[in-house]
Amino acid sequence: MQAISRRLGHQSSVHSLKSVYPLCNHYYGADDGRYVSTVATKGVGHLVRKGTGGRSSVSGIVATVFGATGFLGRYVVQQLAKMGSQVLVPFRCSEDSHRHLKLMGDLGQIVPMQFNPRDEGSIKAVMAKANVVINLIGREYETRNYSFEEVNHSMAEVLANIAKEHGGIMRYIQVSCLGASSSSPSKFLQTKAAGEAALLRELPEATILRPAVMIGTEDRILNTWAHFAKKYSFLPLIGGGSTKIQPVYVFDVAAAVVSALKDDGSSMGKIYELGGPDVFTVRELAELMYDMIREWPRYVSVPFPIAKAFAMPRELLLKKVPFPLPNPDIFNLDQINALTEDTVVSKDALTFNDLGIVPHKVKGYPVEFLISYRKGGPNFGSTVSERVSPDAYP
């Protein structure tokens, strides 16, 4: 009797999975095609939808978003949730790390799921009911527990393997980084390139997006600069600030993820380089930051060898001391190495235009969050007398 009950229970679970995903050729645990790529030849545009397309609608998409609690993750979750998708949010830290995401979707549509990135069983559990996987995992510095190799390469490979075995993943999108190359002087960019290669070996139909440095309310570049400039009254420019970069608004990158997801499959198997409409030198971007926070610009040019010398002690001691070291901000050795080369969109690369998106100019709305750093409040600042007449404020 127990054996019959177990068998009936298994049949009912199979039936429930098939009823939830009637358009998937396989379900998780199926024997057919288990060890071949099963990403659909079309996009998710053919999924059955209900409603008018808002957050209370049903888009048919059930997306597992790895890295959803990070900077880009909140914007991707918002874009998915407002079109009526169910978003599975794997998290590994505090129960509060995903709290802000639950408000972005309708009741029950944002589903936090605790997981261990080193445990394949827990990864399979958070991916089991998904038909879309989006990998946003990445880190710009190493810690005692996680190296670049493990975060950017090994985890990407494990996720691709499990998605390949899954049998019902229609789309797989991985966010890498502009400049990813095996020949880069940066270990971060080297391991990002290795992660891309590992993914394409397992899932050649996957879509890869390479955004440039992202600008936004929670970013790790302009916020870091503004905080440093306010605290120490100057900003170090590594290498004189002559390196060229192409910053992009984070909301545009999130829109690119959703655009690639919603197309007819034309973006599958392709790599897109996502940069903003303008190329800046590091110094020019710093001038934009100073202009927005209304402080007098003061720079200290730091040659690359000296900057590396400042950053080296943390790298040498990282795994030799029995306690965690502070995370690097300005003097991050790997980012210093990356700044020895320009990072701009390649001439013949697929870009925002190929996804039907017109990116925002960085100067303007995308950097308005910096007004919180103005001395005396958003309407004031150290240089306000140069901008308005003395009678503008009582």
Image (cartoon, helix red, strand yellow):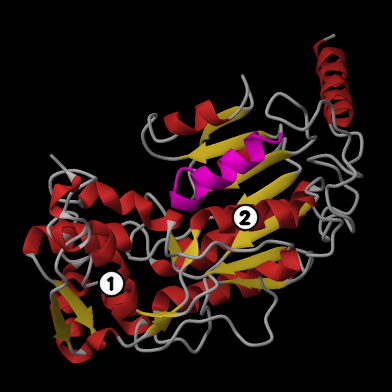
Q: Residue, x 36% and y 52% (percent of image)?
A: 368
Eyeballing the image, is 264 above or below 302?
above
Eyeballing the image, is 246 above or below 243?
above
Eyeballing the image, is 273 above or below 249?
below
Residue 121 drawn at (x, y percent): 59, 42
Question: Mark 1 or mark 2, which is nearer the start of the sequence?
Answer: 2
Q: Residue, x 87% and y 56% (percent of image)?
A: 264
Name which residue type carries label 1: Ala
Q: Visible in this render: residue 125?
A: no
Residue 235 drawn at (x, y percent): 16, 72
Q: Quadrant of residue 388?
A: bottom left
> Please, what secondary structure does the residue beneath circle 1 have?
helix
Residue highlighted by disc 2: 159
Q: In which quadrant of the rendered image does the C terminus lie?
A: top left
Residue 136: assigned label: none
Name which residue type carries label 2: Leu
Residue highlighted by disc 1: 286
Taking depth in this image into account, of 215 and 44 the one nearest to the observer is: 215
Decide: few, some or many residues near mark 1? Use Cα within 10 Å; few <14, some 14-19, many ≥20.
many
> Please, what secondary structure does the residue beneath circle 2 have?
helix
The secondary structure that most of the magenta stretch takes on is helix
Q: Which residues are magenta?
A: 69-83
Taking depth in this image into account, of 47 and 290 the one nearest to the observer is: 290
Horizontal arrangement in the rendering, residue 236 relative to residue 241 (left or right): left
